[in-house]
Amino acid sequence: MDGLVVRGGFGIVYDNWAGVLQTAQNISGLWPDIGQQEAANLNAPTSASPTPTVTAQNPFAIAAGNNFFPAPDPFGQVGFEYDPNLKDPYAEQWNFGVQKLINSSTTLTVNYVGSSMHRLDVAGTYGGATTPSTINFDQSRALYPYIAPTFYDRSVGSGNYHGLQASLDKRYTNGFSYGVSYTFSKAIDVGGDGFYGVEGGVPQDAYNPARFDRSVSGLDLTHILSVNTLYEIPVGRGKRFSTGHGVLDYIVGGWQINNLFQAHSGIAFTPIIGGDWANTGQAGWTGYEHLNKVGNPGLSHKSAGEWFNTAAFAAPTKGTFGDAGRNSLRGPSYWNLDTSLFRIFPVGERRQFEFRAEAFNVLNHVDLGQPHNDISNIQLFGVIDSVASTARQLQLAAKFIF
């Protein structure tokens, strides 16, 4: 069929070395090493400190009553360690789509995109108790009683992504172009949602991560919409609307308006309680413990003062895991409009002066940030006291093109 293209593809993509390098750095400073010394901005002298003043440590010196000799064994230390059989994550990716030529300058594209991810990093405290208990954690309940529980990365996570991507694009013709793209998707995983390891969240059950924590990914955005436009106002010399007077055309012509609109669904998050609530030896500050869901978290009128029904959640019984789903709540949606106004001043045939007025978040719209999700601070639980957007910013610029 004329003007119709069908495409498909499949590939396997392995993670880059960034994760490998981070993992290798995690064990620096652990036994039998004695520590590490770091200094930043040594190449930025000031009037008070014109030269670097940091020197190497004396490994045999005494500091605060402790020497720097390594401990006799590694079993009491807590660090960021990893499975010696850690494997590089990889993803099987595929796509299938069609593209239709609407007219000489406009195309419609629809794609299905999917992937299956394997050997994702799962962090958390490992070596603690294998089951929750009403008894406070001590070493006798550890998986290995002679080893302190420690942060431990393993390549046991998995995930998948399925998305419908559609776009309508008009190439620049007659002073006008636009692009509209929309994605409807869902991402599910067992693994962290953030930068790396414990920084991205940890599972409730360190020994069975998928039990409570296979769910919508924290990176999932159900709806994503992007619209961009470029419009050269057809007024002036050689344009559709000309005054017929060269000087007047020069004054009123040469204007161009550009817009970029972006919007997406809210970011998923988990209702939690801080501390080692299940008494398993997990680090409480990682926020591993989910709350119990005891009601409907939905509200007819959400606000920054209460984004979800806080009465729908309660702390689980001490020594148990919570049943509220990981990433079962959504934060506020986001949208933003940037716009700019350009004015071209021709200077001869090959040179021109360009003036630009640009506005970011031109409507000064406030997008709320994520609500507090830790019931340990009951006063802030469910409250939003941050913003995800920046205030309107205006800038003026000039450019000479020759």
Image (spheres, rainbow, N blue to C red):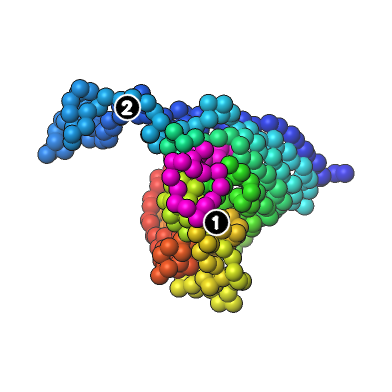
Q: Earlier in the sequence, mark 1 or mark 2?
A: 2
Q: Helix or strand or loop: what does disc 2 sit on?
A: loop
- Name the residue tied to disc 2: 71
Range of magenta residues: 120-143
Left or right of 177? Residue 399 is left
Going by the numbered disc 1, the residue's amino acid type is Thr
Q: Main secondary structure of the magenta part?
A: loop
Q: Which numbered dot is residue 377?
A: none
Question: In the depicted view, which residue is nearer to us: 20 or 137?
Answer: 137
The relative height of residue 199 versus residue 20 in the rendered view (above or below) is below
Residue under the point 72% across and 51% down: 164
Q: Quadrant of the C terminus?
A: top left
Residue at the extreme bottom of the image, as rendered: 300
- Name the residue tied to disc 1: 320
Q: Helix or strand or loop: what does disc 1 sit on?
A: loop
Q: Position of residue 366 (x, y in %)?
A: 46, 67
- Please say whether residue 306 is one of the residues in the magenta stretch: no
Say if residue 223 shows up in the picture. Answer: yes
